[in-house]
Image (cartoon, rainbow, N blue to C red):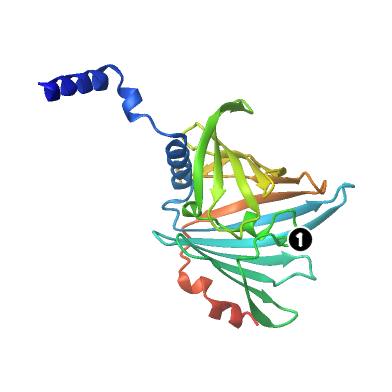
């Protein structure tokens, strides 16, 4: 008899208050939205090439420019491969960075320096080193896999006229230079990133990245026209302008091999 009564009570609760039974935790909600955003941007792109102009601006407004070409290729279920080649200025021309990222193990990175005519393996554990003289670190510039974080949904918030989900992500790897990062993901069908704040190991807000001027490619993939990166500690900033996006260009693994770097010599 008691079992029947308990069953009736349980069924009544499920019927009257289903949202309370199935409600997500902030951690579950944050992970679900973040993964959906990653999927909307990256799953199925195959390979892509684009050009990028990097402008480093010091606290006095003086600028230094660098032009690079970028190639990316996804490895479904495994990670991504990327190659960045410096085109200008002349003293950096020909420098090539090669990166292999993985979902469940440390990433691999190499760099070819033409002046030395050698390929050097770079430890990806050194995440706090500056990337190409910008305000971004290696950690900011890696194609970080979502499996390398835990998540927590914070709130909904209107930002630049769009309702966004605000989510904190927490690096799993102990070598990270950040305690957490807070990302604003809009609630449009593109689930686009609008802003990313980074907090150091003392939980002090030290950097902000703004994502500007999105366009949709191949009828599905949203890509930005610009990142604007501000270092609140140094007063320096970096603009990264992205253009000439080309998807599914026929890149293969051989385009991202260490041997290909060695042949660049």
Q: Which percent across, then down, holds residue 150?
A: 49, 47
Q: Which of these two is toward me, 126 or 88?
A: 126
Q: Residue at x 72, y 62 (%)?
A: 132
Q: Is residue 56 left or right of residue 75?
A: right
Image quadrant of residue 94? bottom right
In the rendered image, the quadrant that contains the N terminus is top left
Q: How many marks?
A: 1
Q: Is disc 1 placed on a helix, strand or loop? A: loop
Q: Eyeballing the image, is 131 above or below 94?
A: above
Q: Residues within 10 Å of mark 1 (few under 14, many from 20)?
A: few
Q: Residue at x 76, y 60 (%)?
A: 133
Image quadrant of residue 65? bottom right
Q: Which percent across, then down, holds residue 135?
A: 74, 53
Q: Which of these two is toward me, 205 or 89?
A: 205
In the rendered image, the quadrant that contains the C terminus is bottom right
Q: Eyeballing the image, is 265 above or below 256?
A: below
Q: Residue furthest right?
A: 60
Q: Which percent across, then down, holds residue 80?
A: 49, 61
Q: Eyeballing the image, is 26 above or below 121?
A: above
Q: Would you name the residue on which mark 1 appears?
A: 133
Q: Eyeballing the image, is 65 above or below 210?
A: below
Q: Which percent across, then down, holds residue 38?
A: 48, 46
């Amino acid at each position: 008899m008691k079992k029947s009564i308990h069953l009736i009570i349980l069924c009544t609760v499920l019927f009257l208050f289903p949202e309370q039974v199935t409600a997500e935790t902030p951690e579950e909600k944050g992970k679900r939205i973040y993964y959906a955003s990653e999927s909307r941007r990256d799953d199925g792109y195959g390979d892509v090439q684009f050009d990028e102009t990097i402008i480093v601006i010091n606290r006095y407004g003086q600028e230094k420019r660098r032009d690079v070409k970028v190639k990316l290729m996804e490895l479904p279920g495994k990670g991504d491969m990327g190659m960045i080649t410096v085109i200008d200025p002349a003293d950096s021309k020909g420098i090539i960075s090669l990166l292999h990222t993985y979902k469940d193990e440390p990433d691999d990175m190499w760099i070819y320096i033409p002046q030395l005519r050698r390929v050097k393996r770079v430890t990806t554990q050194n995440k706090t080193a500056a990337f190409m003289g910008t305000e971004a670190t290696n950690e900011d510039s890696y194609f970080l896999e979502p499996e390398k974080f835990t998540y927590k949904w914070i709130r909904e918030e209107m930002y630049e006229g769009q309702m966004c989900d605000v989510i904190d992500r927490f690096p799993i790897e102990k070598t990270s230079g950040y305690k957490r990062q807070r990302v604003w993901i809009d609630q449009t069908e593109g689930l686009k990133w609008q802003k990313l704040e980074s907090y150091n190991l003392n939980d002090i807000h030290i950097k902000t990245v703004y994502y500007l001027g999105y366009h949709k490619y191949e009828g599905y993939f949203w890509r930005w026209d610009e990142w604007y990166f501000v270092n609140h500690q140094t007063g320096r900033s970096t603009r990264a302008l992205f253009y000439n996006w080309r998807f599914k260009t026929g890149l293969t693994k051989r385009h991202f091999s260490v041997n290909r770097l060695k042949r660049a010599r």
